[in-house]
Image: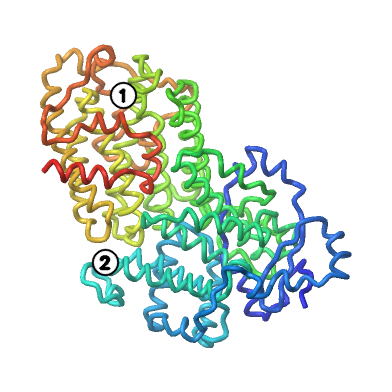
């Protein structure tokens, strides 16, 4: 018989902790800035948890629900009957079979540890102490678990194998020959087993927070391996609604750990939905689909969050000023909102308006300054930061610079009305130069720092996509006669980037396909540099330190991430060719039938395709390049 839940589940003690496993993350105060949270402030209801730990959210007034439940049996609404569901699986896998499919105890523990050192640092959705304690209990009594928790474990294993190096002994868990084939086979194996666990648990109508956490981790790892997860994301969204994650858990009488894991889940799901919609050219749609009064997760470390703590006590645990385990994601959410704004107000318009470009450029720079305020509140230099915080701040910078390229590159391509203004063109070209060079610096920094090796999975994925974007913009600007006095810095940066891509090709499908294109870009850069040598000296440089965004501050290329050869130079000496000449004459073109016309490709490509590698036409570019050989 089902009972009303306003505190903790009536399930066994171990299962009660299960609902505290994940701490999915949610966007900061920007979660409310569109008015949706305010319009949904009256969302309310109660939770029902049956004896097996399955959760159902009942919307409405708790007082009304209490009187209704006194006379109505709602247990079937949670557990339900298998026969009532039209798509149930008749042949479900037994728990024993699913547990026996795990790797050996030693290998499993190693993969779990790798997950917490790699993926969990950038997508902090689990309450680490809770999961580690539950994993220790699982090792002692492997049969005293639930299918949803086992699905979560398999989702963790499937993510962890993507972080393995090419020489990792753990790759021998696969019998494939090539390292990339091994990674793909193992990740597919464990993701499939995670879904088999969920299917055996009849997750489509019986679920709990662990079910939701499993699906969120699956979607995140699929996205970072450039797979498709759109249908699974929609299903997960509705599952989250069915267990009441859109309602702030403070209204549900839950403890602090359970409250935070629900907030993190809802925020992580919103982040995934926003990014997917933006990449597909539908900015803003996710906000309309997420009416909620759920607050943002707290910016705290996991070891300050305890199961016996009340949700009201979270306010006293606010960060002392330095970064926490949650800081990176909370900052990243703000950047995702900015990405949505850039797509909605600039990229999706036939022409970008200068006022919007100025506003968004200033917003990006304010976010950059906010990181320095928090990350360097205690540490005075980057080297004084813990390695994971050092990785966090650099990855945030790389993404912010990627947004800067998205915002300004249409001016450089002269598809924006703002490009008809010489001052605007000069400003945008300098912002693009700063951003592109800084992205390449971060890519090299993460690759070469021995303490950041656990983040190579990110660097050879999304980090490499950002680096590829930067190289294309740099070559495009040089072909148009911009920044000629910086080619002695740009050239080595491009060649070094190509070398990194070539070295990462064994474990990165993106790098393997992009490396030949980078080689062509380097060739075109050198050809364009020779062509632009004929531009009269008087047209090569324009004096002045122009910043059209008043009060926005300087680019953070001057702070912690800029290479020494580039530091403090972009604004003091832009090295921009005669902008008037560029506005009234065609840019120099490399006439070589064996080389792709990048200007034509970029002009014809929808700018939103630079948002994410999931929608970027790399395969077409690679095939076009191969066909010309």
On screen, residue 305 versus residue 527, left or right, reads right
In primary-sequence order, the first of circles 1 and 2 is: 2
Depth order, front residue of 142/625: 625
Check disc 2 and report its element: helix, strand or loop.
Answer: helix
- Seen at 67% across and 75% down, the residue is 81
Query: In which image quadrant can residue 63 be found?
Result: bottom right
The residue that label 2 is drawn on is 181
What quarter of the picture does the N terminus occupy?
A: bottom right
On screen, residue 397 versus residue 500, left or right, reads right
Depth order, front residue of 318/172: 172
What quarter of the picture does the C terminus occupy?
A: top left
Residue 278: give x, y in percent of width and height.
Answer: 47, 41
**Color style of the picture:** rainbow
The residue that label 1 is drawn on is 572
Disc 2 packing (10 Å; few <14; some 14–19; many ≥20): some
On screen, residue 629 versus residue 620, left or right, reads left
- Seen at 50% across and 51% down, the residue is 272
Check disc 1 and report its element: helix, strand or loop.
Answer: loop
- Seen at 28% across and 43% down, the residue is 468
Residue 183: give x, y in percent of width and height.
Answer: 31, 67
Query: In which image quadrant can residue 220 be found?
Result: bottom left
CB within 8 Å, label 1 to label 2? no
Disc 1 packing (10 Å; few <14; some 14–19; many ≥20): few
Q: Against 132, is 453 above or below?
A: above
Residue 559: give x, y in percent of width and height.
Answer: 38, 38
Q: Against 438, is 55 above or below?
A: below
Residue 367: give x, y in percent of width and height.
Answer: 49, 38
Q: How far apart, in angstroms, are the residues tagged by discs 1 and 2?
A: 49 Å
């Amino acid at each position: 018989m089902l009972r009303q839940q306003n505190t903790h589940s009536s399930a066994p003690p171990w299962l009660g902790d299960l609902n505290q496993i994940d701490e999915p993350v949610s966007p900061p105060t920007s979660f409310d800035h569109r008015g949706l949270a305010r319009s949904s402030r009256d969302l309310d209801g109660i939770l029902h948890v049956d004896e097996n730990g399955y959760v159902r959210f009942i919307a409405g007034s708790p007082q009304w629900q209490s009187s209704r439940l006194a006379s109505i049996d709602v247990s079937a609404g949670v557990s339900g009957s298998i026969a009532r569901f039209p798509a149930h699986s008749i042949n479900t896998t037994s728990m024993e079979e699913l547990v026996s499919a795990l790797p050996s105890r030693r290998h499993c523990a190693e993969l779990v540890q790798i997950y917490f050192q790699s993926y969990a640092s950038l997508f902090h959705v689990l309450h680490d102490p809770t999961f580690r304690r539950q994993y220790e209990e699982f090792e002692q009594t492997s049969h005293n678990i639930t299918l949803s928790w086992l699905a979560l474990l398999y989702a963790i294993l499937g993510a962890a194998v993507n972080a393995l190096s090419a020489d990792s002994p753990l790759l021998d868990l696969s019998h494939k020959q090539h390292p990339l084939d091994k990674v793909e086979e193992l990740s597919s194996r464990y993701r499939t087993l995670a879904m088999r666990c969920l299917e055996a648990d009849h997750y489509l109508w019986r679920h709990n927070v662990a079910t939701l956490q499993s699906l969120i981790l699956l979607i995140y790892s699929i996205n970072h391996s450039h797979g498709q997860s759109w249908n699974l994301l929609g299903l997960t969204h509705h599952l989250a609604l069915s267990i009441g994650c859109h309602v702030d858990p403070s209204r549900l009488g839950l403890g602090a750990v359970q409250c935070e894991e629900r907030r993190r889940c809802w925020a992580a799901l919103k982040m995934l939905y926003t990014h997917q919609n933006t990449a597909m050219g539908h900015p803003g749609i996710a906000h309309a689909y997420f009416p909620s009064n759920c607050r943002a997760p707290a910016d705290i470390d996991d070891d300050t969050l305890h199961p016996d703590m009340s949700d009201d006590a979270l306010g006293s645990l606010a960060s002392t000023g330095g970064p926490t385990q949650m800081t990176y994601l909370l900052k990243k959410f703000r950047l995702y909102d900015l990405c949505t704004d850039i797509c909605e107000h600039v990229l999706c318009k036939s022409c970008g308006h200068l006022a919007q470009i100025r506003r968004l450029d200033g917003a990006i720079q304010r976010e950059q300054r906010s990181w320095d305020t928090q990350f360097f509140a205690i540490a005075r230099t980057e080297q004084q930061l813990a390695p994971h915080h050092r990785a966090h701040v650099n990855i945030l910078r790389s993404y912010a610079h990627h947004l800067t390229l998205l915002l300004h590159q249409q001016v450089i391509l002269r598809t924006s009305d703002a490009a008809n203004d010489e001052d605007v063109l000069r400003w945008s070209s300098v912002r693009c130069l700063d951003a592109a060079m800084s992205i390449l610096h971060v890519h090299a920094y993460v690759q070469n720092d021995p303490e950041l090796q656990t983040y190579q999975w990110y660097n050879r994925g999304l980090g490499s996509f950002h680096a590829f974007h930067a190289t294309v913009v740099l070559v495009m600007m040089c072909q148009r006669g911009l920044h000629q006095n910086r080619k002695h810095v740009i050239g080595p940066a491009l060649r070094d980037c190509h070398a990194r891509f070539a070295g990462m090709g064994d474990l990165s499908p993106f790098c393997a396909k992009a490396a030949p294109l980078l080689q062509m870009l380097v060739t075109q850069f050198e050809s364009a540099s020779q062509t632009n040598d004929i531009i009269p000296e008087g047209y090569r440089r324009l004096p002045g330190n122009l910043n059209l965004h008043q009060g926005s501050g300087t680019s953070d290329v001057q702070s912690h991430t800029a290479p020494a050869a580039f530091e403090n130079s972009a604004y003091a000496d832009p090295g921009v060719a005669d902008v008037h000449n560029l506005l009234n004459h065609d840019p120099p073109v490399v006439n070589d039938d064996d080389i792709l016309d990048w200007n034509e490709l970029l002009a014809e490509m929808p700018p939103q395709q630079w948002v994410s590698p999931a929608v970027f036409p790399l395969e077409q570019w690679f095939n076009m390049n191969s066909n010309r050989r």
